[in-house]
Each structure stands twice: as C-alpha cells, then as structure tokens.
C-alpha cells in the first residue's frame, strides 16, 4: 500500500465487509491517498464480486470467508446493506480482534445499534457512522476516491462510547475527505428520513404510478420526461436491495415523515380543487425560502 | 434585426405578450439567430420589466399597452402565466390583425382553448403550443437563446385548425431549435400532469413538510440536504405565480394523478409497515426499468 507522503496510516489493518459503491470507494481512497490502513482486507458475498475486486486491485487481501476477513483487523467497517448486518455480525463477532473498532456506513443508525450492539465482544468499540454521499449506482465498479470529498459524514456515538475510538473514526472520515458531524442515532434517522429516504420513496412511487398509466399515455410520458420527472427517475434507479433494507430499517421515522407529507400533499390538492390561490402560493413560496436557505449554506 | 444568412423571416411582426423566462428566450433567438420575425414587439405588465427589456435590447419595440402591442402583428404569442390569459385576451382580441396567428407557450392547453377560443376574431387562427423546456428561474434576465435546443415543443391544434397556420407554428419552433410533437390538448394535459405538474407539487410539498419540522430537526435538514432532497428544493424554487396558475388550470388531470400517486405511496408505506420486502423491491425495480427506458430513448 502506497502511503501519501507523511501520512502515518490510522490503522494497521482495516477490514471492509462489503465492497460495493461505498466499500470500494473507501478501498480506492486507502490505495490512492494512503493514511487509512497499512493493509486493506475486502470481503463480499458473491464469487463474482470477489473476483472483480481482485481484478480491480483495490484491496490488499480479498477474503471470501467473513470470519477470516475480520481476523486481526483493528478496524472493521460494515459496508453491506443494513438488512444484512445481523447475519454478518453473527458470523464475525467471535473472530473480532480484542479492542477492535467496529464501524459502518449504513444509511440507518438505530437499526445498526440494534443489530450489532448486543453481539459486540467486551472491549471492542462500536462507533456507527453514515457518509452522506452516494450515487444511484452500485457494486465495486461504481466507487471512486472522490465520493466523500466535501460531503458530511455523520458519526452517531452511543452514550459510553470510548472517546478515543470515536475520535479515530472521525479522523478516518476526515482523511476520506469528509466533513464530520455528530448526531444522536434517533435524530439521525429522523433527519435522513426526510432528507433522503422519503424523497427516494416518492421517486420510486411516481415512476410506478407512471408505469401503471394506459399504454398510450405511458409512451408519451417516456417521450416528454424532460425536467421534473427525469430527476425523479434518476433517484428511482437506485439499488433495490439497499433501499428495501433502508426502508425496513428506518420504518418508524419514514412512516412518520410519509404521514406528514401525505397530509400536506392532500392539503395542497384540496387547495387546487377549491381554487385557494393564496394557500397554493404560500406553499410554493416556502419552497423558495428553503432553497434560499440551502444556497446561503452552500448546500444547493 | 440581424437575420441568420439565408433565413427569410417566418413572420413580419411577432408580438410577445409576456417577456419572462420563455418570452425573453424567444426574443433572444429572434435577435441572435434571425429567421423568426422582421420586428419583435414585447409587452409585459410592470414598468420595471418593460424598462429591463429595453435595457437588455432584446426586442425591437417595447410596448406597455397590450392592445397597441398586438396591432399589425401577424403572430401573437402569449407568454404570460396561464391564469392571465383570459384578461389579456379580453384586452387584445379587438385589436388583432385580420388573419393573425395566435399561439402561446403555456404549460396547460385545455385552459388556453377555454380562455382564448371564444374571443378569437373570425379569420384569426388559434394554435396552442407548449415548449417542454424551462428552468426554476423567471423574468427577462432568466431567458437564453439555447433554452429550446433539442427539447420538444408540443403543438396541440384543434379540430378545424387551419393547416397552414399550424405548419407556421411548427416551423417557428423548429427555428427555435425544438423538436416538434403533436398531441390533442386533453392528452397533453394528462401527460404534463404526471411528467411535470405532479413532480412540482410533490417538491413544493416536501419542502413545506420539512419547513414544519421542529426547529432542531429543520436545522439538520438544511445541513444534510445532500442528494435526494436538494433536487427537490431546486424544483421547488420555481415561480409561485406561474405554478399556482398551472395547478389551477390543470386541476382535473393534476388531481387525478395526485390521487393515483397517493394510493401508490400509501401502498408502499403499508408494505414498509408490514415488512413486505418483495412488494418494496418490485416497486424499486420498476423505477430502474423506466429509467432504462429513458436512457434507451436518450431522454435521461
Ligand atoms: N449507495 C448510496 O448512495 C449509499 C450512501 C450512503 C450509505 N450507504 C450505505 O452503504 C451500505 C452499502 O451500500 P452500497 O451502495 O455500497 O451497496 P452495494 O454497492 O450494493 O454493495 C453492497 C456490498 O455488500 C455486499 N454484501 C451484501 N450482502 C452481504 C452479505 N450477506 N455478506 C457479505 N457481503 C454482503 C455485496 O457483495 P456482493 O456484490 O457479493 O453481493 C457488496 O459488496 C449500505 O448499508 C447503504 O445503506 C449507501
Ligand atoms: N418556466 C418554465 O419552466 C416554463 C416552461 C414551459 C412553459 N412555461 C409557460 O410559459 C409562460 C410564461 O412563463 P415564464 O416562466 O416565462 O414566466 P415569467 O418568467 O414569470 O414571465 C411572465 C411574463 O408575463 C408577464 N405578465 C404576467 N401577467 C401579465 C399580464 N396580466 N399582462 C401582461 N403581461 C403579464 C410578466 O410581466 P411582469 O414581469 O411585468 O409581471 C412577465 O414578463 C407560462 O404560461 C408558463 O406556464 C413556463
């Protein structure tokens, strides 16, 4: 592993459980920028992915056995869909190196604590995290070293987390190019429910709704998918397994946001039905205000 | 007016009623590319816009009186919000040149026929049209000559429309860089309801929903607006007057699509509540399929 000049690797051995979009981006950063790990071990589920990761040459060791993969690693990073955490943890937990840091990149955080927490060996440190960066692509070919640059990574330590372990995870993400924020896991899940999970649910739904239209209209929809709708289809092209797992593992927060949203959409629909021009304008104005807020924060 | 070499102007005198994003883009094309009109007359409502259009120098004549603006024009193009059509038409109808073509750029088409049709002087020709191109910006500074390049313009002639007038309008948009499609007005309104109007309604709603969250969560939402949500806020930054008018003038089609969408969103929410993994995956897969359809059609 080539280190960037002067950057002493943060960990001796990092194990990536899952080498898709996110895992392979971390692997590429470790290889290209250095400073993360002397040795990167990568594990995935299917022979096809393992072979592809070998071909890409983005990990030092590619290991098909999850239990072996974590052996000796001082940092283990879950990069699998959140629905697979419990199963993978059951396999690896007995093989974790004493004192190892276990962290992850999952899009939900309460579920991670629920699924990993009870199986953590005493002396190991669980520090959940979520890089707020992604694309609609998946798999080891989709990753790239710049993915996290200038994006937030939210770290969600638990009460009693070892401060040194938390700081190491923060530093890890800093070296990946990310800006670090800390939230408690429940707030994290609420915020991502409205910022990310609900928008995905709406995007998946609207393309389904379009798909159910009569053939003639559907043809025209595809033809004129221009501005509004096209953005939705981009979001809607995301990975089914990952998003199924996200929805099922952030159920409460997502359903709460969907309920609020549905009420608001119905209210706007009602205003359209009854010609309540001012109500409609007020709703649209709020959109501009929020957008302006984002621009002021350089988030737009 | 400088004509592009060899392009004989299609019209002698074109009158733009409204010089916002769309109207000022047409004016810029007429000036920069030629081939549209020997003389462009521009009318807007407020002194501020009239003064700005004069300053920009994008029209040959800037006329504050709508009735005078249309005088002698062989083509009059409504580029005002669709809710203003009836009022503007009442003013200009008695002053239309005999044989003039009246066309428009409005985002709804049934309402245009409803509002302009009855006031059309005999011998004048109504040919509604809708360029499927836009941005979230408005006003005369927002326009640019490339806006319609490679985008569809949908022409919605009525039974009995004069074929020569329809062909002139088609040619007008071809010279603006657009690809031309023909739809009947009712189909147009349904298609844009799902392709454009419903996505806007959803975007306005989700930012409103976020705006109603408790202060702490709202702060975090702005901070982490990353991928999904940010796209929605861009759409949601659109002009309140224009969109209020679009919603109110495509009421039936929009409410129908909202009802279908709401059913589908509830069904997906229900699947999340009850852990129906396969139903969720199926919905997400349909998104990918539609996206692929768009990519195959080069619409994505
Ligand atoms: N995509 C985003 O936009 C994004 C953003 C932030 C966070 N995240 C989170 O990051 C995590 C990974 O997402 P991703 O986009 O990188 O997914 P991805 O590209 O689909 O990759 C998933 C990886 O996990 C492996 N995997 C799946 N099930 C496994 C199992 N039971 N045992 C071992 N390996 C398994 C897969 O291996 P095979 O290929 O062999 O199946 C693959 O290498 C998810 O938790 C997601 O919530 C995603
Ligand atoms: N924006 C899009 O994405 C888009 C795309 C396709 C079609 N369209 C359609 O194009 C039309 C114009 O939209 P736009 O985006 O260009 O809007 P815009 O930028 O807001 O411009 C509207 C123009 O109409 C003028 N106007 C408004 N009320 C008027 C009245 N009563 N009498 C005379 N002039 C009046 C305004 O003048 P003042 O500035 O003086 O008020 C302004 O020049 C709308 O019908 C819209 O549905 C829009």
Image (spheres, coloured by chain):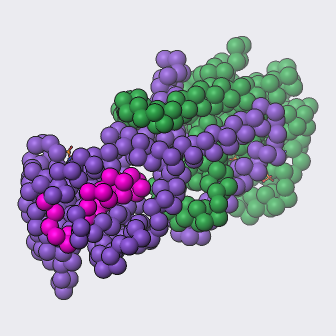
Chain colours: A purple, B green
Question: In terms of image quadrants, where is residue A30?
Answer: bottom left
- Residue B183 is covered by the magenta coloring: no
Locate the C terminus of chain B and report the quarter of the image it occupies. Answer: top left
Of A146 and B102, which appears nearest the observer? Answer: A146
Say if A43 sits above or below B300 in the image. Answer: below
Q: Residue furthest bottom?
A: A6
Q: Residue furthest top?
A: B160
- Residue A100 is covered by the magenta coloring: yes
Give the extent of the magenta segment.
A95-120
User: Residue placed at 18% from the left, 75% from the top?
Assistant: A11
Say if A88 sits above or below B289 in the image. Answer: below
Total tally of numbered discs in the picture: 0
Say if B123 sits above or below A291 in the image. Answer: above
Horizontal arrangement in the rendering, residue B237 relative to residue B277 (left or right): right
| Residue B39, x across and y down, in percent | 73, 46
| Residue A150, x across and y down, in percent | 40, 70
Horizontal arrangement in the rendering, residue A250 relative to residue A170 (left or right): right
Of A162 and A16, which appears nearest the observer? Answer: A162
| Residue A83, x across and y down, in percent | 32, 45
| Residue A18, x across and y down, in percent | 21, 52
Of A60 and B291, which appears nearest the observer? Answer: A60
User: Residue placed at 36% from the left, 64% from the top?
Assistant: A129
User: Residue placed at 71% from the left, 59% from the top?
Assistant: B57
User: Residue placed at 52% from the left, 49% from the top?
Assistant: A253
Residue B82 appears in the rendering: no
Say if B278 sits above or below B42 in the image. Answer: above
Residue A164 appears in the rendering: yes
């Amino acid at each position: 592993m080539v280190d960037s000049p002067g950057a002493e690797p943060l960990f001796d051995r990092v194990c990536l459980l899952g080498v898709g979009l996110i895992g392979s981006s971390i692997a590429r950063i470790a290889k290209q920028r250095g400073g993360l790990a002397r040795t990167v071990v990568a594990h995935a589920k299917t022979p096809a992915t393992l072979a592809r990761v070998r071909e890409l040459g983005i990990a030092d060791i590619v290991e098909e056995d999850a239990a072996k993969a974590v052996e000796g690693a001082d940092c283990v990073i879950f990069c699998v869909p959140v629905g697979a955490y419990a199963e993978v943890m059951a396999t690896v937990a007995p093989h974790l190196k004493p004192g190892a840091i276990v962290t992850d990149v999952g899009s939900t955080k309460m579920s991670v604590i629920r699924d990993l927490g009870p199986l953590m060996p005493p002396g190991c440190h669980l520090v959940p995290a979520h890089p707020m960066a992604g694309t609609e692509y998946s798999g080891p070919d989709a990753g790239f070293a710049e993915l996290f640059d200038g994006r937030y990574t939210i770290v969600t330590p638990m009460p009693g987390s070892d401060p040194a372990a938390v700081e190491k995870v923060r530093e890890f993400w800093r070296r990946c190019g990310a800006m670090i924020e800390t939230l408690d896991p429940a707030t994290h899940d609420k915020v991502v429910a409205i910022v990310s999970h609900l928008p995905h649910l709406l995007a998946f739904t609207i393309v389904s709704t379009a798909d159910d239209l009569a053939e003639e209209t559907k043809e025209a929809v595809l033809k004129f998918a221009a501005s509004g709708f096209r953005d939705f289809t981009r979001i809607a092209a995301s990975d089914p397994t990952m998003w199924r797992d996200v929805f099922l593992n952030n159920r409460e927060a997502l359903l709460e946001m969907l309920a609020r949203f549905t009420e608001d959409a119905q209210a706007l629909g009602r205003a359209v039905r009854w010609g309540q021009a001012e109500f409609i304008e007020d709703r649209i104005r709020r959109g501009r205000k929020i957008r302006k807020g984002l621009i002021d924060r350089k988030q737009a």
